Amino acid sequence: MLKKRIIPCLDIKDGRTVKGINFIELRDAGNPVELAKRYVAQGADELVFLDITATIENRKTLVALVKQIALEINIPFTVGGGINAIEDVSVLIKAGADKVSLNSSVVKNPALITEIANQFGSQCVVVAIDTKFENDEWKVFVNGGRTLTSLKTIEWAQKVESLGAGEILLTSMNNDGTKAGFAIDITNKVSKAVNIPIIASGGAGTKNHFKEVFEKTAATGGLAASIFHFGEISIPELKYYLKTNKIPIR
Amino acid sequence: MIAIIKYNAGNISSVQNALTRLGYSSVITDDTATILSADKVIFPGVGEASSAMEYLKENGLDKVILEVKNPMLGICLGLQLMCESSEEGNTTCLGIFNTKVKKFPLTDIVPHMGWNNFESIKGSLFKDIITKNDVYYVHSYYAEISEQTSAICNYIVPFSAVLQKDNFYATQFHPEKSAAIGTQLLKNFLAL
C-alpha cells in the first residue's frame, strides 16, 4: 500500500535554514545539510528546499548547497525558489535535485510547466500554489505571498495538471505559521479536482493535524517546517502516532 | 569498475552519488568498450520512453546494452526500456524482459509517487530485505507481471517491481532514493 509522506521543508536564505511566520518574519533554524541528514536519519520520506531569497548571487550558493545535499542524502528531494527558465532546472537537476518546485514563474508563463515536463518528465515538476481565502474565495498568490493574482485555486490546479505538472504543493497562507492545522477545506477540494498527488502545507502544529489532513483529504503528503526544525514534534514520534492511528506510514 | 550508462534521461548523478556513498567509483559513459568491460552496469533514468529509446538507437546504445554480459541493473525508466514495448509514445523497447509497459488506469492518483512495498520476492537482490520494507516509486507506467518478475508491487494493479533475466536486473523503484533498504539492494547488486 502506498504510504502517506511526511515532508520537512527547509526554507533557505543565504545558505541557512530559516522559517517565517505568515511568510514574513524570519528566524534562523540552522545548517541545511545537517538538518537534512538529521531528517533522513529520523525517517523523513522526502525533503523540500525552498530558496526564499533567490537572487543571482544566492543562486550559486544554492546550487553548491544542492550538490552537497545530493551527496549526503538517499531520499528524494525537491528544490524551489526563483526558477524562471528551463536552464535553471537543468542546473539544479544536474546538481542532484530530483524535482523542482515552481510558483510565480509558471503563473507568469504556464508553458514552462510543459517545457520542463517534456524534457525532464512530469515526475520532476512540482507546482507550488500559495493560496489564501479572501472574500469567500480561494485565490492564488505569487511572489512569496505578496501579490494577489486573478487565478482561482481549483482552476489553477486543474490547469497545471493538464500542462504536465506531476505534483502540487498546496500552501494555505491563512494557516501557514499558525500551528492551527492544515486547511482541510481547500486541500480536500483540490485533491478531488485533480488526479496528481497533493502535498498539504501550512498550519501543522500537532500530530493530530497530520492525521486529520490524511483522513479528511486525499493529500498524499504533509509538509511542515518549524515544528520539525525546533523539535516541537519529532518525525519518529509523528510517524508512530500516525501508524497507531491506522494511517499508512513507512 | 562500474559503468553508468549516459543518455538523455534524467537524474543520473543521484545514482553516482549513491555509489560514491557506498565507496564505489563509477563512470558515466556512453562508450561501448567501457560499458562492455565494466564489472557492473547501471542503466538509470527518469524521462520519456520514446525519446529515450530514440536517443539509445541514434547512439548505438540499444545494441551495446544487449551485449552486456556482466550484471546490469535498470532503474525506473531503465526497467521499462528493457521490456518489449511501452505505451508511452507507443515505443518498441529493448525486449530483454518478455513483458509490456502500460499506462496506469486513472482510477487512483497517477503518478504512483511515494513509498510502497513489494511482495513475492525472490532472487539474490533481496538478501537481508523483507517484504514489508518500503521503497520509493515514481512512475505513471508499469511493467506487467511475467515469469521474469522477481518482486510485485500493488498500486491500482499488481505490477513488476523487480524483473530479472540472466545477468539483467531491473527495479521500478529507485534504490538510490530508497534510504537504507535501497542502499542494501544496491549493495546486493554490487556483490553479485
Image (tube, helix red, strand yellow):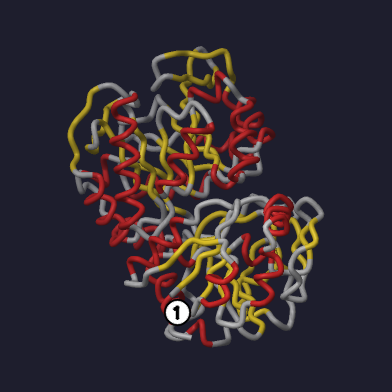
Look at 69% across and 62% down and name the residue there.
Answer: B60
User: What quarter of the picture does the N terminus of chain B occupy?
Assistant: bottom left
Q: Residues within 10 Å of mark 1 (few under 14, many from 20)?
A: some
Q: Which residue is mark 1?
A: B190
Q: Chain of mark 1?
A: B
Residue A1 in view here: no
Residue A31 to residue B145: above or below: above
Q: Estimate the x, y position of residue B147 in percent, counting from the top left.
A: 73, 83
Pinpoint residue B87: horizontal percent, then vertical percent. Answer: 79, 56
Residue A83 seen anywhere in this rendered image of the structure: yes
Which of the pair A99/A182 is nearer the observer? A99
Q: Which residue is pictured at 39% across the width and 64% down the height? A: B18
Q: Say which residue appears at 64% left-offset and 80% top-offset.
A: B164
* Dot 1: element: helix
Vertical arrangement, residue A80 with respect to residue A235, above or below? above
Residue type beneath disc 1: Leu
